[in-house]
Amino acid sequence: MALLITNIQELLQIRGPEVAKVCGAEMAVLPSLKNAWLLVEGDLIKDFGAMDTCPDVPAEVIDATGRTVLPAWCDSHTHIVYAGNRAAEFVDRINGLTYEEIANRGGGILNSARKLNETSEDEIYEQSRGRLEEVMKLGTGAVEIKSGYGLTVEGEIKMLRVIKRLRETYPVAIKATFLGAHAFPTAFKDNHTGYIDLIINDMLPVIARENLADYIDAFCETGYFSVEETGRIIEAGKKYGLRAKIHVNQFNAIGGIAACVKQDALSVDHLEVLNPEDINALKNSETMPVALPSCSYFLSIPYTPARQMLNAGLPLALATDFNPGSTPSGNMNFVVATACIKMKMTPEEAINAATINGAYAMGLSGSHGSITTGKKANLIITKPIASFYQLPYAFGSNLIESVIIDGKIIA
């Protein structure tokens, strides 16, 4: 049966099918319709309009009086497939150690890699599906999930198979990204070329054969993968049809952004440190910059300079970076609030960044991220609120009443 949502106080993010992303000043505009209805048939948005045009059709009816309806969040950067946690490192940072110092003594990514390689695929799946179910209830309707905690052929393939199982089991849209180039394993600490050869010659052929990934990623950063090494990873991915989504400029600006744009990366993510050359490289490109404010919050590092980027006419997406070490949260509501509070984005800009631009950053803007006839019926219905401004304003409150994914109420 169809689903008809009536008496919607405000229906947010109404777009035509031609809008794939919004940039610069356009991000301050969030098209909406007050006193609206929306009709869902199957898993798609069938139609919507003002209440004085509401159709009389056989349907399950939800009365949304006093409530706002908006597209479900599109989280384009997560690492939610992992084993265990790194709570001990959280305390280490409280006691004064930096992220880099923890990594240098065998913590960080290498710590997660040890745990993952010691854990069975079934157990990793059980842990990861709990996290996925949690973020869906918090309003996420599309999510990218990376590998990167295996750092061995077996470990990386195991992670990607878990992601595939999640995609086959849950209605949420899932994009898989191969991140074998997350860190250099201890055995290859002094043999970077050897590990990159392992990625290219041993990991990628299996991933391609089993169709386990949509994108490829690398951690382009001082102490991890250089610009040149990242370029080699990107080129290798292209040969298997994997477009790049790259970690870059988290701690240092080393020229990675310009290199990624030149290689037609779909997104460049983190960007806590930016210089004018980076911004110029992103202008008029097809590469989406992605900010991860929860990571800045958790690590107490700078926030992506959103105002500088938007004033330069750039687009911007927001994502959680959900992972065990630097952002153990997949709450996109908190991301939107933090972007407003710490990055000085307006609520309109932050919602655009977390919906339509987030969808673009994982190749889903044709089906997700806006209220558009024919797109997936992935929706958030808020509790009664005076204005959608309350979503970031009341940052510690859960203002979501219902979540609809693929046309079905899941929370």
Image: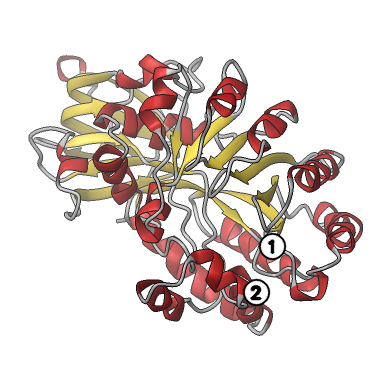
Is mark 1 in CB contact (under 8 Å) with mark 2?
yes
Identify the residue at horizontal 73%, vertical 68% (top origin). Answer: 151
Q: Name the spot of residue 45 as percent of width and height, x first.
A: 40, 30
Q: Nearer the viewer, residue 106 or 8?
A: 106
The quarter of the picture where residue 205 lies is bottom right
Quarter of the rendering occupied by the C terminus: bottom left
Is residue 371 at least partly visible in the picture? no
The residue pinned by badge 2 equals: 113
Identify the residue at horizontal 70%, vertical 54% (top origin). Answer: 178
> For the residue marked with disc 2, what is the amino acid?
Ala
Against 364, residue 33 (above or below) is above
The quarter of the picture where residue 299 lies is bottom left
Against 213, residue 112 (above or below) is below
Identify the residue at horizontal 58%, vertical 20% (top origin). Answer: 280
Q: Name the spot of residue 81 as percent of width and height, x first.
A: 56, 66
The quarter of the picture where residue 158 lies is bottom right
Callout 2: SS = helix
Check disc 2: other Cα within 10 Å, few if <14, some if 14-19, many if 20+.
Answer: many
> For the residue marked with disc 1, what is the amino acid?
Ala
Callout 1: SS = loop
In space, the residues marked 1 and 2 are separated at their CA atoms by 10 Å
Mark 1 or mark 2: whose residue is earlier in sequence: 2
The residue pinned by badge 1 equals: 183
Quarter of the rendering occupied by the N terminus: top left
Horizontal placement of 107 versus 225: left or right? left
Q: Name the spot of residue 220 as percent of width and height, x first.
A: 67, 48
Total labels drawn: 2
Q: Name the spot of residue 37 as percent of width and height, x first.
A: 23, 26
Mark 1 or 2, closer to the camera: 1
